[in-house]
Image: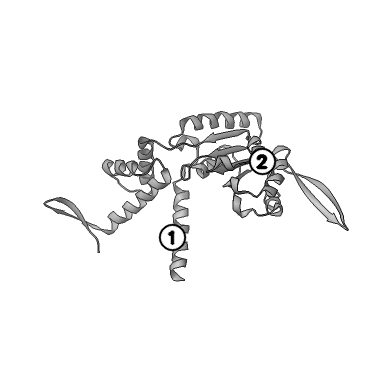
Amino acid sequence: MTDILNSKKIDSFEEEQEISLRPQHLNEYIGQEDLKRNLRVFIGAALKRHETLDHTLLYGPPGLGKTTLAYIIANEMKGKIRVINGPSIEKPGDLAAVLSTLESGDILFIDEIHRLPRIVEEVLYGAMEDFTLSVIINRDGNARTIEVPLPPFTLVGATTRIGDLTSPLRARFGIAEKINFYSENEIADIVNRTAKVYNTAIAPEAVNAIAQRSRGTPRIANRLFRTSSRFFRFCQRKFNKSGFSYICP
């Protein structure tokens, strides 16, 4: 039991660290130049028209920054963000409870949106298209539908499996952007930025070693940085004839 609790504490601590590493604005975000260029145009146009941003779909392999971009979109649009996970929404009532708390200009971020149940997805259609929520009331055997107006909001969906999204749901996103793997140089820049956030000195050779082993994924690069940083802090460096070696207690 103790191991389980400690594991949860570690996961929570690492999640807080991940949040602290996230850039807050597009000009701080490293890589994905084409995607950033497109988002600047879409966001700038929406702000100029005093409208909400079109619903946005972000897709690509895990660990590339989809959640980070959702937070950046919220910051750039000067709106609040509400984050939910697709599998956690099991029935239409769950989604209705979330939608009813949104305010004008809010960003609703649904991670793993491809895992939404079909019956929930159908409720989402009206909310995305007309900003209305259809509620069915069954009283004394007589069922009727009430249309509840919703404030204008932006849905940002993230998925690692774009092919699992239904065509009707995909068609309701005005913006769809793919996030690609990062180059070694971009990963090196991300590692250097992480080191600055942690106020930790890191040698260029170490930066390159991490970048080469990160498979183009910032999440892996940041984990490797944290692991190696802990290792070097814990162990003592000794010099011998063959070079430097590390002795750990």
The residue under the point 25% across, 58% down is: 235
Amino acid type of the residue that numbered disc 1 sits on in the rendered structure: Ile
Give the quarter of the figure containing the C terminus: bottom left
Amino acid type, label 2: Phe
- Spatial distance from mark 2 to mark 1, Cα to Cα? 34 Å
Q: Nearer the viewer, residue 61 or 222?
A: 61
Q: Residues within 10 Å of mark 2 (few under 14, many from 20)?
A: many
Asked where in the image residue 234 lies, by quadrant, the reply is bottom left
Answer above or below: position of 144 versus 72. Answer: below
The residue where tag 1 is placed is 10
Using the image, tell me which numbered label, if any, was put on residue 154.
Answer: none
Where residue 175 appears, x then y in whole percent? 60, 33
Q: Who is closer to the viewer here, 196 or 130? A: 130
* Residue 141, picture quadrant: bottom right
Residue at the far left in the pictured view:
241
Instruction: In this rendered view, identify the residue nearer to me: 179 or 248.
Output: 179
Q: Which residue extends farthest bottom? A: 1
